[in-house]
Structures are given as structure tokens and as C-alpha cells.
Image: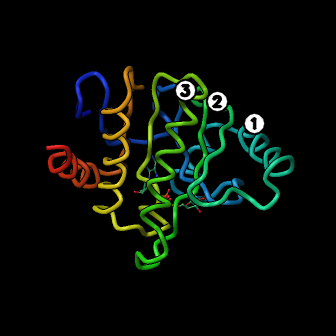
Amino acid sequence: MHEIIKDICYSCTGDISQIHVDAIVNAANSSLLGGGGVDGAIHQAAGPTLYAACRQIREQSLPAGLPPGEVVSTHAGRLPAEYVIHTVGPVWSGGDQEESLILASCYEQAIIEAQRLGCRSIAFPSISTGVYRFPKKQATEIAWRVVYEYIQHTDAPMKIYLIFFTKHDEKIFLQATRTTGD
Ligand code: AR6
């Protein structure tokens, strides 16, 4: 685990479904009904009550699904976290389809939702950098910019954990943290 900003922001390599925080963010798809990667790991570890909660949201409030850049929260089933904040990242299609704005919105909206829920800690995966093919360096710079801005402008910020699946991905992030905010 790397401490990026003392007592507030950390990065680490691992499986986000196993992290002990108040809220974890799910890199879901618009259906909210599961998939692979982060989404698959979260649903697998959380068990069927999470799937049932997502189904209920689809039936009651989001019949057309969750749009990219937006968030919705549920309980976390059997996970160590209390809440799952589901978001849908942009599918990378070259960079001229507002992918960067949508990705920033995922992080911003998740932070707002975690604050609304009264969370003191939140863990993010590297949204859109798997199946959705967003370039990792660019994605990590966007994630870091949003997180850094939040920390700079908030009196008592939540603890923020950025979780990477490989050491290599975490290294790309750590490089981004060295160039921002100097
Ligand atoms: N913990 C932390 N990071 C992970 C884990 C894990 N358990 N598993 C993968 N990663 P992805 P996306 C990393 O594909 O690109 C799903 O099918 C992975 O290496 O999970 O937003 C959804 O249902 C990558 O860097 O999410 C959607 O259909 C990052 O997490 C679609 O994938 C994100 O990879 C969303 O694609």
C-alpha cells in the first residue's frame, strides 16, 4: 500500500471486492445486472442479495439502465464494505466521444454519493481501463485529478483508496500523482 497524501489517499494492488471501506465503487455496465472484471468479482463475493438489489433498481427507477457517468448505490451483500456505488464508465472509442468528461463524472458522482451516504472511506477501481479499453495512463490522470481536487477543496475529506489489479497499473498511477499538483 502506498500513502499518496498523508492519512487521506492511498493506492494499492489487489481485489477491490475484499477491501474494508465504507463504500466500494463498481465499474458496472448500464444493465447493472453483472458482467466480468470488477463487476464480476463484486457480484461473486457479495452474493445474490446484491444482484436482487440491482434488479429492483432496474425495475423501480432505472428501466432503461444507468447512463454512463452516473451512479447509483446499493447495500454490499456479503462484502466487507457497507455500500456498493455502481457507476458506468465510458467505452473508449478514440477520445472524441466525451470519454474523458464521462470518466471524470464517474469519480465525481461517486464521491458525492459516498458523502450523501455518510461514508468516511471509499475505494475505486480503475474504471473503464479493462473491457472498456480506456487508455490506462490517461484514465489514471483523470482519476487522480478528480481525487486531488476533492481533497484540496474539502475540510475533512474521506479516506480514498485507489485499487489496481496489477503492480504495473499502480505504477502508472503513481507516476500521474508525481506530475499533478506541483
Ligand atoms: N479488483 C480490482 N481491479 C480489478 C478487478 C478486481 N477484482 N478485476 C479487474 N480489475 P473492468 P471496465 C481491473 O473490465 O473497463 C464488466 O464486464 C482491470 O484490470 O472490470 O469499466 C462490466 O459489467 C481494469 O484495470 O471494467 C462492464 O460490462 C479495471 O479493473 C465492463 O466490464 C477495470 O476493468 C466495464 O468495463
Q: Amino acid at mark 2?
A: Arg
Q: Categorize mark 3 by other alpha carbons within 10 Å: few (<14), some (14-19), many (20+).
A: some
Where's the N terminus, which quadrant? top left
Residue 47, percent across and down?
69, 38
Residue at the image point whose x is 44% and y is 42% from the top? 124
Looking at this rendering, what residue extends furthest in the front direction? 153
Pointer 2 or 1: first along the chain = 1
Q: Is residue 63 above or below residue 13?
A: below
> 55 or 35: nearer the eye?
55
Q: Is residue 148 above or below residue 100?
A: above
Q: Dot 2: what SS?
A: loop
Q: Dot 3: what SS?
A: loop
Residue 34, percent across and down?
66, 54
Q: Check mark 2 vs ligand 1: CB closer than 8 Å? yes or no.
A: no
Cα distance in 3D space between marks 1 and 3: 14 Å
Q: Check mark 1 vs ligand 1: CB closer than 8 Å? yes or no.
A: no
Is 137 on the left-hand or right-hand side of 55?
Answer: left
Within the image, what quadrant is residue 76 found in?
top right
Cα distance in 3D space between marks 2 and 1: 8 Å
Does the residue at mark 2 contact the one at mark 1 (Cβ under 8 Å)?
A: yes
The residue that label 2 is drawn on is: 78
Residue at the image point whose x is 31% and y is 63% from the top? 138
> 6 or 157: nearer the eye?
157
Does the residue at mark 2 contact the one at mark 3 (Cβ under 8 Å)?
A: no
Q: Dot 1: what SS?
A: helix
Is 31 on the left-hand or right-hand side of 98?
Answer: right
The residue that label 1 is drawn on is: 49
Residue at the image point whose x is 69% and y is 53% from the top? 32
The residue that label 3 is drawn on is: 80
